[in-house]
């Protein structure tokens, strides 16, 4: 079962790995599968893609019966855009379905250099430091990074040479559908206007750490409504709440999560931001860079085995803060700070040094990931690395 935001490329990708595609959002096909899903499945070639399966949730029970009779793996690929399990009484699939998350396209894919046999960025950093890091001949500038972040990773935008106006029009349409049609599939009681306002506030604070109360006041909603919106947007695969990291060697840690919209282009469109507005605001450009950089790492983590877990770290009153802390196995962590600057210095790495001293040998590596061209060591197991090294 491949899940992810609408228009992230699930059907197009899955269709390349099957013999037959069944589109359950087509009325005639859906009617046949509702009438007798078992018979309809028997007529398919294997492997078969059951696209938009949530339109006919009864098909999952038929898949279960088929798999119980023939346990050969890989017979069925299921794709959908919403967590239909929340709104339908369906078979959970435990032990028979492998769930995979699909995120919008990253630069490593768009530039046609996936090479997933090569270790992930986090593994290279943890095991080899700078030795296995490479850069393109012409590293991007801060303007280039902002342009990439504004474009985002939805394939319809990422793989087409669209003008800024065409891109913003497509993303605006996506947002309209998200808060009306898609949200209604999961929860018919949500007010589209309030949801859109809350989404705008989230986008304006993307990758930031405002208090929950600050978000609620800005959006004009109460805590219960905001919690419902957070869950709804998570169920639609557009919101990722990175949990706070806990460790018995650290005290007074902030416990609430760090909110990200999973696509930086969608976040910019929701907030009404353009390149000049972002580049002229140091806080905005920093959070946009953080959000874009994190979006480049999610798919690597999703396919990593064993899967790493992402967290953020913040002490009360913001005295210490690390943008991302990734647990990479055996108690070891990789810590990342994102800096929209061309030449990080010792001050930019001070929280990484602090964490290294607290964790000792469990601190595998840390990096200030930045927008400049420099690739250099900043101290024991701490490095300055341009973001483009992730996809180079």
Image (cartoon, rainbow, N blue to C red):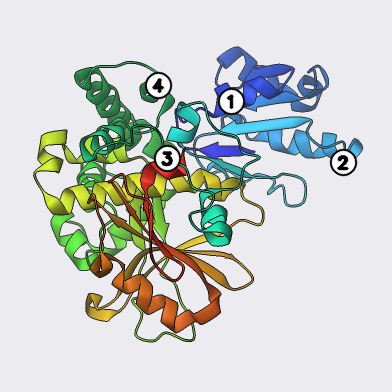
Q: Are marks 3 and 4 in contact (CB under 8 Å)?
A: no
CA distance separating discs 2 and 4: 38 Å
Report, in whole angstroms, how far the alpha carbon at label 2 lies from the one at label 3.
Answer: 49 Å
Quote the CA–CA distance across marks 1 and 2: 27 Å
Q: Earlier in the sequence, mark 3 or mark 4?
A: 3
Q: Residue furthest top?
A: 28
Mark 1 / mark 2, whichever is N-terminal: 1
Residue under label 2: 68
Percent x, y for residue 40?
76, 20
Vertical comparison of 117 with 225: above or below: above
Q: Which picture quadrant has residue 34?
A: top right
Foreground label between 3 and 4: 3
Q: Nearer the viewer, residue 294 or 219?
A: 294
Judged left or right of residue 24, residue 339 is left
As measured in the structure, the alpha-carbon distance from the residue carrying label 3 to the one carrying label 1 is 28 Å
Q: Residues within 10 Å of mark 1 (few under 14, many from 20)?
A: few
* Disc on the earlier residue, 2 or 4: 2
Which is nearer the eye, 139 or 326?
139
Residue 74 to residue 200: above or below:
above
Q: Judging from the image, what secondary structure is the residue with disc 1 in? A: helix
Whether residue 131 is visible to the viewer of this picture, yes or no, is yes
- Residue sitting at x 29%, y 16%: 162
Label 4 neighbour load within 10 Å: few <14, some 14-19, many 20+:
some
* Percent coordinates x, y for residue 287 in the rendering: 24, 52
Q: How many marks?
A: 4
Of pointers 4 and 1, the one earlier in the residue sequence: 1
Tag 3: Cα neighbours inside 10 Å, few (<14), some, or many (≥20)?
A: some
Residue that label 3 marks: 135
> For mark 4, what is the residue?
156
Q: Secondary structure at mark 2?
A: helix
Query: In this figure, which residue is indicated by the disc labeled 1?
Result: 13
């Amino acid at each position: 079962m491949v899940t992810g935001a609408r228009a992230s490329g699930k059907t197009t990708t899955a269709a390349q790995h099957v013999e037959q595609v069944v589109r359950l959002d087509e009325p005639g096909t859906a009617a046949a599968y509702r009438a007798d899903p078992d018979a309809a499945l028997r007529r398919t070639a294997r492997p078969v893609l059951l696209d938009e399966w949530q339109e006919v949730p009864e098909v999952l029970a038929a898949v279960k019966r088929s798999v119980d009779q023939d346990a050969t793996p890989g017979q069925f690929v299921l794709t959908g855009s919403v967590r239909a399990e929340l709104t339908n009484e369906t078979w959970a699939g435990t032990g028979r379905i492998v769930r995979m998350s699909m995120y919008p396209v990253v630069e490593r894919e768009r530039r046609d250099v996936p090479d997933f046999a090569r270790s992930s960025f986090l593994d290279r950093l943890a095991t080899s430091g700078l030795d296995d890091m490479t850069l393109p001949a012409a590293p991007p500038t801060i303007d280039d990074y902002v342009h990439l972040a504004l474009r985002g990773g939805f394939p319809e935008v990422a793989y087409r040479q669209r003008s800024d106006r065409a891109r913003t029009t497509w993303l605006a349409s996506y947002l309209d559908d998200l808060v009306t049609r898609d949200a209604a599939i999961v929860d018919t009681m949500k007010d589209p206007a309030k949801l859109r306002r809350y989404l705008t506030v989230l986008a304006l604070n993307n990758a930031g750490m405002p208090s929950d109360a600050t978000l609620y006041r800005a959006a004009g909603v109460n805590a219960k409504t905001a919690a419902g919106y957070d869950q709804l947007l998570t169920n639609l695969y557009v919101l990722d709440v990175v949990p706070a990291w806990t460790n018995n060697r650290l005290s007074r840690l902030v416990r609430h999560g760090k909110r990200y919209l999973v696509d930086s282009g969608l976040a910019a469109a929701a907030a009404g931001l353009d390149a000049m507005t972002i580049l002229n605001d140091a806080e905005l450009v920093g959070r946009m860079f953080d959000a874009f950089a994190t979006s480049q790492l999610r798919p690597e983590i999703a396919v990593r085995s064993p899967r790493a877990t992402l967290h953020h770290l913040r002490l009360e009153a913001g005295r210490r803060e690390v943008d991302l802390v990734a647990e990479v196995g055996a108690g070891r962590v990789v810590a990342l700070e994102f800096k929209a600057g061309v030449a990080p210095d010792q001050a930019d790495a001070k929280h990484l040094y602090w964490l290294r001293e607290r964790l000792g040998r469990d601190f595998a590596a840390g990096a200030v990931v930045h927008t400049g061209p420099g690739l250099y060591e900043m101290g024991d197991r701490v490095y300055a690395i341009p973001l483009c090294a992730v996809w180079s």
